[in-house]
Amino acid sequence: MILNIRNMVCRHCVQAVERLLSDIGIKPVSVELGRAVIDEQELTPAQLSALDKALTDEGFERILTPEAELTERAKHVILNHLRREECPLNLSACLERHLGTDYPSISRAFSATEGRTIEKYYIAQKVELVKELLLYGGLTLAEIADRAGYSSAAHLSRQFKSVTGMTTTQYLSSRPERSPLNMV
């Protein structure tokens, strides 16, 4: 049986889902971003209730509709597209290629499920990447703009301020100092 799970974004999420499945007595065959394969053909109502509670407690949620599943898969493609150094495709073509569905269908499902457009989600993820790169240090704003797919540092700065309400300098000064103790 395949369980599709929302909000799994990293290897720590995979480990958390593996642990919570084992904790409630469900043996996972495999767990990867967005899904878990389990031995059971069907879960009892009590198992489903325990699973839903455990997932919610960890910030996850079972995906119950095809639209929600498509949206979650689209999120993973968007994150991979953003973090790849050189992707030859634009975002809509990348989504179509990886999801095997036309962009208008993906876009409709995404907006209905998320309550925002793919473009707004993509911009939010780009800004999160910029925050990470700013905190990492060692890169100029122009280099960060290039890595995050902006046409210029000025474009990055305008979008960053529009999304966060502060400049990149204000963002950096609002963060606590990084020391060896809190970098772990």
Image (cartoon, grey):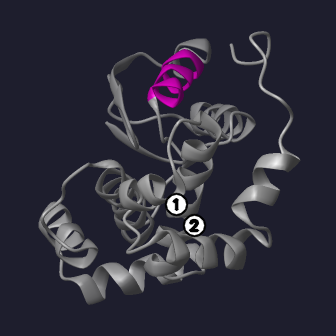
Query: Percent x, y for residue 142?
Result: 46, 60
The reply to whether the C-beta atoms of the residues labelled 1 and 2 are less than 8 Å apart is: yes
Judged left or right of residue 82, residue 115 is right
Q: Which residue is mark 1?
A: 125
Find residue 25 and report its image quarter.
top right
Hey, what amino acid is under mark 1?
Gln
Dot label at residue 39: none
Residue numbers of the magenta segment: 11-20
* Residue 113 visible, this orientation: no
Identify the residue shown where x is 32% and y is 33%: 41
Q: Secondary structure at mark 1?
A: helix
Q: How many marks?
A: 2
Q: Is residue 73 above or below residue 180?
A: below
Q: Which residue is mark 2?
A: 124
Judged left or right of residue 26, residue 100 is left
Q: Quadrant of the C terminus?
A: top right
What secondary structure characterizes most of the magenta part? Answer: helix
Pick the residue in front: 132 or 36: 132
Identify the residue shown where x is 31% and y is 36%: 1
Magenta stretch: residue 50 in it? Answer: no
- Neighbours of disc 1 within 10 Å: few (<14), some (14-19), many (20+): some
Hey, what amino acid is under mark 2?
Ala
Query: Percent x, y for residue 33?
Result: 38, 38
